Amino acid sequence: MITSVLVANRGEIACRVFRTCRELGIRTVAVHSDADGGALHARVADASVRLPGAAPADTYLRAELIVKAALDAGADAVHPGYGFLSENADFARAVTDAGLVWIGPPPAAIEAMASKTRAKELMGLAPLGEVTEDDLPVLVKAAAGGGGRGMRVVRELGTLEAELTAARSEALAAFGDDEVFVEPYVEGGRHVEVQVLADTHGTVWALGTRDCSLQRRHQKVIEEAPAPGLPPALTAELEELAVRAARAVDYVGAGTVEFLVADGRAHFLEMNTRLQVEHPVTEAVFGVDLVALQIEVAEGAALPADPPRARGHAIEARLYAEDPAHAWAPQTGTLHRLAVPDGIRLDTGYADGDTIGVHYDPLIAKAVAYAPTRAGAVRALAGALERADVHGPVTNRDLLVRSLRHPEFTAARMDTGFYDRHLDDLTAAVPDPYAPLAAALADAHGRSRFGGWRNLPSQPQTKRYLMDGDGRGDGTGTEHEVRYHHTREGGLAAEGVRVVHADAGLVVLDIGGVRRRFHVHRYGDRVYVGATALTALPRFPDPTARQEPGSLLAPMPGTVVRVADGLTEGSPVTAGQPLLWLEAMKMEHRVSAPADGTLTALYATPGRQVEMGTLLAVVQSTP
């Protein structure tokens, strides 16, 4: 009987496993890097053990440190979560060799399936050898791990070597393994997967399908169960193939078999020998706790012969600290507030006031809605996200809402190219014109009408904000100036509306006979009015605030990992030429020349840590 579990992971998955352990009466142990010393998963565990350092390679990828932490803390079992070492057979062996229970599949099964190249061979498939023009487009893919890291679509043969180098670098940083391979890239398909669960007594469950087609950079954004619109015969084929894959390697525990469905055919992608990020939608539809079942299987319990029946529909949206309108750039900063309406499951590794840093994946939370029908689940999740308070770094929240309401998604006609086709429309600014006024009125509440150098209550007061319709409030956007005045009765008034109520947290405006309520939250010069984020501007702007033309600024905080070979000050460059690469949150981001010209300054060196907005280089364009 397991009494204490160490989770060899961080963030929301560690918190999620701890939640089940507490319900089962099992003691919990966390591991944390120095960057995660105050993280939620370390705070909620019964005990936590420090892994010195911040980079994954120095901390969460150090198997010997994690095994020692489990022994030192008195744990008798290890749950790997997902990512990091979750699909590392050597880690699984190290756990069992230390006398601990491994809550996962046998090492031999991990070895057979965790490497995508070996998994394809097992299924009678093989990656491409030498790539020719006739093979394009192709997909470069990391052999280990998942989550879209180490994946690149290549459409031009001349870019293949550069993309292989970038993929190897990403894979090594994320998984400690730089093996990559190349396979044909199937366009216009749907990403469909099957959840499996197997015990040590020969029973293998196929717990239905999930559709994970909405992806950016090959990382899933919105997932649902069951996969909508599949013919019953195709669903049965997918489940049969998944069970066959599990039995082929004597699988034990929870795993996922992934497919690309195109033209009514199933193309095997890989088997992930771990719990998936999107497992909550399967839990909702089948009424199970997959973590609890993992623990029971690890203790030797037998599963019932038949899995439970699926009921209803569930949809999950991943809330990321990233800016979809600017190449999905990851964001950092303080998460001031995160709250969703009742009835929505929220799995998160953050609490109000926590800091989202640069070292790890930018996932903030997963929001999950369940309903008897797909349409009901879509509506519930979109409405909940729209009303949610997400105050802090830039997020993809508005993108999620618009994606869920897009006609292709509501009609279940989406595929993996969804964001390639629709990203511009989904990220177009749709500002609320009354948000700046509501912010100004809330700010003015309680102030003396004779404040400052104005002494006539009828004189207009002015306030300026930068507003972005996607709620960024990041110091960029459209500038708005609003005017209001104090009335002789001590109230507030503005042209074109009637101020029904105004205090520091709530403003009610009558607009053409319709009353609208605006909830206002302020954090320094950052103001949130409903879902709209604003940045309050000073009354007198700094006239010296300007940037030299051609300056290349860091689009996100991160680490300079590479500079283009031979690049020095004075080098000629061409528009779009890659100059340097930043690593942020385990992804590489290319910084390219904005125009033809000359590199007149280069401040980036490999290993340098930079903040968002740091000057990296200057390109003087050719006249």
Image (spheres, rainbow, N blue to C red):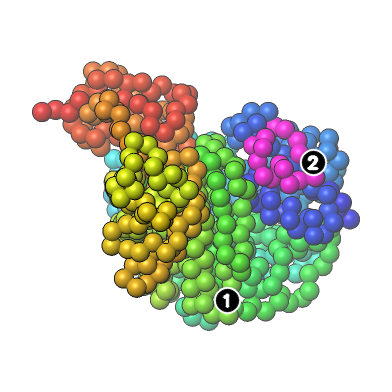
Label 2 sits on residue = 47
Q: Quadrant of residue 203?
A: bottom right
Label 1 sits on residue = 371
Q: Position of residue 479 (x, y in %)?
A: 29, 46
Using the image, determine if residue 52 lies above or below residue 318: above
Q: Which amino acid does label 2 sit on?
A: Ala
Using the image, determine if residue 139 lies above or below residue 236: above
Using the image, determine if residue 512 lies above or below residue 358: below
Query: What residue is shown at x 82% (from left), y 59% (from top)?
Result: 24
Q: Nearer the viewer, residue 490 or 277?
A: 490
Q: How crowded is mark 1: few (under 14 residues within 10 Å), some or many (20 or more)?
A: some
Q: Answer yes or no: is residue 102 visible.
A: yes
Q: Position of residue 184 (x, y in %)?
A: 40, 55
Query: What residue is shown at x 85% (from left), y 56% (from top)?
Result: 25
Q: Are marks 1 and 2 in contact (CB under 8 Å)?
A: no
**Start-end of magenta stretch:** 36-51
Q: Where is residue 420 in the image (x, y as percent from the top left)?
A: 34, 57
Q: Position of residue 285 (x, y in %)?
A: 63, 73
